Structures are given as C-alpha cells and as structure tokens.
Image (tube, rainbow, N blue to C red):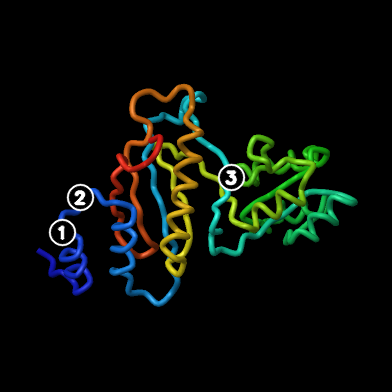
Amino acid sequence: MAKQTKKQKMLAEKLGDNQALHTFDNALQTLRDLATVKFDETIEVAMNLGVDPRHADQMVRGMVSLPSGTGKDVRVAVFARGDNADKALAAGADKVGAEDLMEDMQAGNLNYDRVIATPDMMGVVGRLGKVLGPKGLMPNPKLGTVTPNVEQAVKDAKSGQIEFRVEKLGIIHAGIGKMSFSDDAIKANFNALVDAVVKAKPSGAKGKYVRKVSLSSSMGPGLKIDTADLAGA
C-alpha cells in the first residue's frame, strides 16, 4: 500500500467519514481549515440532478446573478453597431465590433467569458456557430445574451451573473466565489444558485430533482451537503 503524504493524513483525520453529510456552514469551514495553498481558491458547487439532458424536456440551463459577485474578471465581447456599440463600451465591454469582431474570432481570438449581441447582429454572429457553440459562448435570447439592451447585459456579466447548464451526466458545476470572500457572501451566492436551479426545473424531470450537492475548493476535497436543508430541492 502506498504511503500517505502528510496532507493526505491530515485530510483523513479532519474529514473522518468521507460519506458524511454536512451543513453548508460546516462544509465551508472545513474547506477553510484544510486550505494550504497560497493563491485565492475558487469555491465550487456541483449539483447532481434527476434529469437526462439528452431529452429536450429535461434540459436545465439559465442565468443567475450572484449577489456577492464571482471574484473573477469577466471578459465580455459584444456584437453591436452605432449607439449600442458606444453603450457597450461605456458599460465595460472588453471588445465591441461587427464583421471585424467576427473575423477576429474566426482567427482564433476567443478569450472571452461572455458574448453578447443585439438582435440585428445575429446575421453576423450566426456565421460563428461552429466557433462559439462548442465553447458555450453562442448568444442566446433565452439567456439574455441576445438583447437590444447591451448596456445592461454587459453590466450584469461584469457584476457577477453566471450561466449554469446541466452536463451529460446530469451535473451542474459552478464557481460561487473565492476563499477570500466572507462566509455570508459565499452563502448568499450558494443560495442564489440553488434557487435559480430549482426554479429552472424542467417539465420532464421525474422523481427527486436535486439528488446530490457537494461543495469544494480548487485544491480541496468535495464535501457532500445535506439536501434536506435546501429550500425547494
């Protein structure tokens, strides 16, 4: 049997029963106690849902504004012209353009977390389906990323709005802040995410919807949260 490292021994001692359920507060405190790295770790949530996203009526996807922000510098590109382009820049967009932005993205410059477009620009954006689609960056009116109000969309993206989307195995992953955030700030973001996911329950979901929830940090273990404490889950 391989010899345990000091960190592995410490984890085993502090975690005890790895299958134990935790309250959110206890899980967060445990992650803080175990943190040893020097960088500001991201606090992450994984939600295992009772859905099969291969079926259209069981897809879970949406946007949620995290009240405490994400602690991340979000890069936003906007497809717009004229006054809308000026408003997007004033709101803090990192790149604004039309055909020139399309060509730039086709050349491989895709260092963005969010792509927003005005409705009249979708003819241009549509040519980027094979480029933006696989990265989950394609503007979508249902997510508010195709909108005439690009100014607000940029502000929302910059202030902590995130997208959540269920993966093939029925799991949603999302970052809800940094280790440097206060407990209250992280918990407010956690509650906002859970609430949004619960409200996005699809018509085709049968049985228990939120099956498992875990909390982790960038370099820490995943700790199971007691779903009985989650409102609406």
Kind of element beneath mark 1: loop
Which numbered disc, 2 or 3, marks the residue that appears first in the sequence? 2
Q: Residues within 10 Å of mark 2 (few under 14, many from 20)?
A: few
Q: What amino acid type is highlighted by mark number 3?
A: Gly
Q: Is residue 104 above or below residue 50?
A: below
Q: Are marks 2 and 1 in contact (CB under 8 Å)?
A: yes
Side of 156 where 134 appears, left or right:
left
Q: Residues within 10 Å of mark 1 (few under 14, many from 20)?
A: few
> How much space separates mark 2 and mark 1, taking CA atoms?
8 Å
What number is the disc on residue 136?
A: 3
Q: Residue at x 39, y 39 (%)?
A: 231
* Quadrant in which the N terminus is drawn: bottom left
Question: Observer-nearest residue: 167 or 203?
Answer: 203
> How much space separates mark 1 and mark 3, taking CA atoms?
38 Å
Side of 62 where 226 appears, left or right:
left
What number is the disc on residue 16?
A: 1
Q: Residue at x 45, y 48 (%)?
A: 191
Question: Observer-nearest residue: 109 or 210?
Answer: 210
Kind of element beneath mark 3: loop
| Furthest residue in direction right, as rendered | 82
Point out residue 109 in the picture as x, y percentages from the top left corner: 68, 58
* Quadrant in which the C terminus is drawn: top left
Q: What amino acid type is highlighted by mark number 1?
A: Gly
Point out residue 200 in the picture as x, y percentages from the top left corner: 51, 33
Q: Residue at x 82, y 49 (%)?
A: 80
User: In front of the other: label 1 or label 3?
Assistant: 1
Q: Residue at x 46, y 66 (%)?
A: 181
What number is the disc on residue 20?
A: 2
Point out residue 94 in the picture as x, y percentages from the top left corner: 72, 61
Q: How many marks?
A: 3
